[in-house]
């Protein structure tokens, strides 16, 4: 028999439930409201009169962490959102809208698109892209932090799976910052003390907390998005023009997947801009334009994944719309590879 915690094990949940509740006598009383109450009290206690900085990525974890910290210490919190220019269409504005205009959290919005594109100029190797994006993020973030004066704490949306992955968790040594997580990876020698209100939660619990805090559904249920963003979905060098092309194609994928009711059922759905041009016909003319690949996968945790058996009609609409609406694209292909052996991202 497989381990009971593995999703596909028959009756695995029941085995665990029976062990915890009947055998160990656990009460199963976890609920978002009591978590929020305790987390807010803990943050207040830890932070005192100090100032807290929180880097927002656009994803749910950092937004929930920031909202909790804000509830605890209000004006003592400053959020920094470094827009790397590699986000999906509208996502940067949405973050600013939710955090700043709706929640009135003090937010510094840095448009660092130029710096990131400059750092990525001519780079084709996927790992080199990641390294350059990581180091650019650190530089921009540190500049901002320095300009804000005395900051004592850094709030992060670290989740329990990140804690489990680190070797010496819950010790002083573990108070370093993971390198590959969403905000892009901060250096371990930052002078801040860490505030990590989500470090004992799993993703589904973070979502429940986010909803209980009144964060909007579209943010709480956002699909995972890699820190390096669209840069690792443009195969080859990243340019402004290619980013625009990918962003337009990606928008169609997300729009149609939401329209078909599949957005929350699949793990990720997105477009990739391949380095291939192909011949097509449009009207009376011959075209020679980009090939876009569409990747839609089902997964429990991103470790393994299977390509989603999306209805042909949905794929048909996605393909037609991309070719009609995105000028530089004349062909769309669907990725039918599973992980392993393929990865979810192409780079
Ligand atoms: P792969 O492509 O390795 O992706 O099958 C597994 C999951 O991780 C995400 N991913 C990343 N996330 N920084 C991130 O924050 C990265 O460099 C990165 N690379 C992959 C990917 O989107 C998928 O959910």
Image (tube, rainbow, N blue to C red):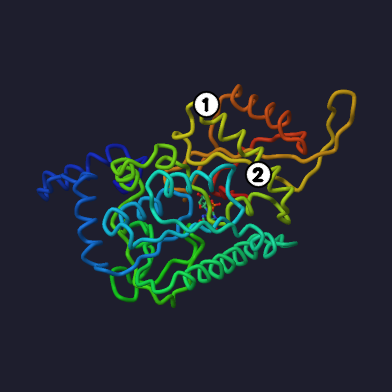
In this figure, which residue is indicated by the disc labeled 2? 272
Question: x, y percentage for residue 175?
Answer: 35, 71
Residue nearest the observer in this picture, 45 or 19: 45
Foreground: 283 or 92?
A: 92
Disc marking residue 259? 1
Residue 192 is labelled as none
Q: Quadrant of the N terminus?
A: top left
Sequence order check, earlier mark of 1 and 2: 1
The kind of secondary structure element at disc 2 is strand
Could you tell me how far apart the alpha carbons at marks 1 and 2 are, in whole angstroms? 20 Å
On the image, the x and y values in percent for residue 65 come to 35, 55
Residue drawn 40% across the image and 43% down it: 102
Measuring from the top left, give residue 67's x and y in whole percent. 34, 51
**Closest to the observer, 89 or 266:** 89
Callout 2: CB less than 8 Å from ligand 1: no
Pointer 1 and pointer 2: residues touching (CB < 8 Å)? no
Q: Nearer the viewer, mark 1 or mark 2?
A: 1
How would you rate the neighbour count of disc 1 (Cα within 10 Å): few for under 14, some for 14-19, many for 20 or more?
few
42 displayed left or right of 277: left
Work out whether residue 30 can be spotted: yes
Q: Is residue 269 above or below residue 135?
A: above
Mark 2 is surrounded, within 10 Å at the Cα level, by few (under 14), some (14 to 19) or many (20 or more) other residues, namely many
Name the residue: 47% across, 42% down.
223
> 235 or 55: nearer the eye?
55
Image quadrant containing the C terminus = bottom right
Count of all numbered marks drawn on residues in the image? 2
Residue at image coords 63%, 57%: 113
- Residue 347 visible in the displayed image: no
Residue at the far top in the pictured view: 313
Q: Is residue 187 left or right of residue 47?
A: right
Say if 281 sits above or below 85 in the image. Answer: above
Label 1 secondary element: helix
């Amino acid at each position: 028999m497989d381990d009971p915690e593995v999703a596909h094990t028959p009756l695995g949940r029941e085995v665990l439930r029976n062990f915890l509740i009947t055998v160990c006598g656990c009460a199963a009383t976890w609920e978002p409201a009591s978590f929020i109450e305790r987390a807010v009290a803990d943050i207040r206690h830890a932070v005192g009169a100090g100032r807290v900085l929180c880097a927002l990525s656009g994803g749910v974890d950092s937004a929930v962490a920031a909202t909790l910290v804000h509830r605890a210490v209000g004006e003592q919190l400053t959020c920094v959102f470094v827009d790397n220019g590699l986000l999906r269409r509208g996502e940067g504005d949405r973050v600013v809208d939710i955090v700043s205009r709706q929640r009135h959290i003090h937010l510094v919005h840095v448009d660092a698109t130029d710096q990131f594109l400059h750092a990525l100029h001519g780079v084709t190797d996927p790992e080199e892209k990641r390294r350059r994006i990581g180091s650019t993020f650190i530089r921009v973030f540190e500049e901002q932090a320095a300009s804000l004066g005395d900051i004592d704490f850094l709030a992060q949306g670290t989740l329990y799976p990140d804690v489990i992955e680190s070797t010496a968790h819950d010790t002083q040594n573990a108070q370093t910052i993971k390198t590959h997580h969403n905000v892009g990876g901060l250096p371990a020698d930052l002078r801040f003390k860490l505030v990590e209100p989500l470090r004992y939660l799993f993703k589904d619990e973070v979502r429940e907390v986010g909803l209980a805090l009144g964060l909007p559904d579209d943010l709480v249920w956002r699909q995972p998005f890699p820190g390096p963003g669209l840069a690792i979905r443009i195969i080859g060098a990243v340019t402004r023009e290619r980013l625009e092309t990918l962003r337009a194609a990606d928008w169609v994928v997300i729009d149609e997947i939401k329209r078909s009711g599949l957005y929350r059922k699949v793990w990720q759905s997105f477009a990739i801009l391949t380095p291939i041009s192909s011949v097509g016909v449009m009207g009376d003319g011959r075209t020679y334009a980009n090939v876009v690949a569409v990747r839609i996968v089902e997964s429990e945790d991103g470790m393994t994944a299977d390509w989603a058996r999306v209805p042909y009609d949905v794929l048909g609409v996605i393909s037609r719309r991309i070719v009609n609406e995105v000028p530089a694209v004349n062909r769309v292909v669907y990725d039918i590879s599973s992980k392993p052996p393929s990865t979810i991202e192409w780079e």
